[in-house]
Image (cartoon, grey):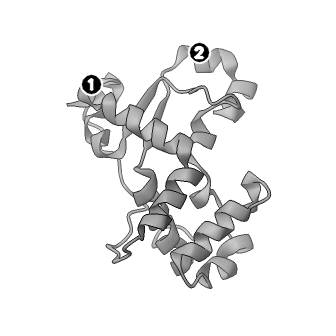
Amino acid sequence: MHFFTRTAPATLRQIPSVAILRDPVARFVSSYCYARAGGGRHRQVVDTFRDRYMKFRSVDDALDHVENARSIYGMDHIFRPQSWYVNDRSEQVLVDHLVPLSAVANLHRVLPAFRGVRIQHLNESLDHDIVLTGRQTARIHAIYHQDVLLYDRSIKNADRFR
């Protein structure tokens, strides 16, 4: 959204915008597994980070990496907060609709152009058996505090998609 607000602000005001959000804890666990595998069936972790991520020994290694990144670009996009993509610098939401991942199939209820459109899930990972400690979950909530707020807001608005 940062890019579009700078390069096409008039167009952005004329078309609806949507952010599909995942539960921050589930997203982090999925990103961790994806990082350790070096990517997935359709995409790979960028070369800059792949070797390092494949050497993570634990969830705490990944959390340390994210907490210690000197900038948003010091980590692969899979670990960047969802809020970075949809909020401005003052944490104001730049998109019209926040949609929880669980409601994507009903997106057409808010945006009729999506009626009959099947949205593919290309990055789906296999089930994993990661069990987080309370401390790890708390760290994720602290790191991704804005994402927790956005996701909660998307869940509260999900009735529009039912």
Q: Residue furthest front?
A: 135
What residue sits 34% from the left and 73% below the top? Answer: 126
Q: Residue furthest right?
A: 70
The numbered disc on residue 110 is none
Q: Which residue is mark 2?
A: 13
Q: Quadrant of residue 73?
A: bottom right
In the image, 30 versus 50, the foreground residue is: 30
Q: Where does the N terminus fall, quadrant-wise?
A: top right
**Nearest to viewer (mark 1 / mark 2):** 1
What residue sits 52% from the left and 74% below the top? Answer: 59
Secondary structure at numbered mark 2: helix
Q: How many marks?
A: 2
Return the x and y of residue 62 as percentages of the image width and height.
59, 71
Whether residue 45 is visible, yes or no, is: no
Left or right placement of residue 77 versus residue 97 in this view: right
Query: Disc 1 and disc 2: Cα gap in Å?
Result: 22 Å
Return the x and y of residue 41 as percentages of the image width and height.
45, 73
Mark closer to the chain start, 1 or 2? 2
Q: Quadrant of residue 30?
A: bottom left
What residue sits 35% from the left and 24% below the top? Answer: 111
Secondary structure at numbered mark 1: helix
Left or right placement of residue 2 versus residue 155 in this view: right
What residue sits 46% from the left and 52% below the top? Answer: 24
Return the x and y of residue 17 as percentages of the image width and height.
50, 27
Q: Do the residues under discs 1 and 2 have CB atoms within 8 angstroms?
A: no
Return the x and y of residue 132 as percentages of the image width and height.
41, 70
Left or right placement of residue 106 versus residue 95 in this view: left
Disc 2 residue type (three-letter):
Arg
Q: Where does the C terminus fall, quadrant-wise?
A: top left
Disc 1 residue type (three-letter):
Arg
Q: Is residue 8 above or below residue 132?
A: above
Q: Which residue is mark 1?
A: 160
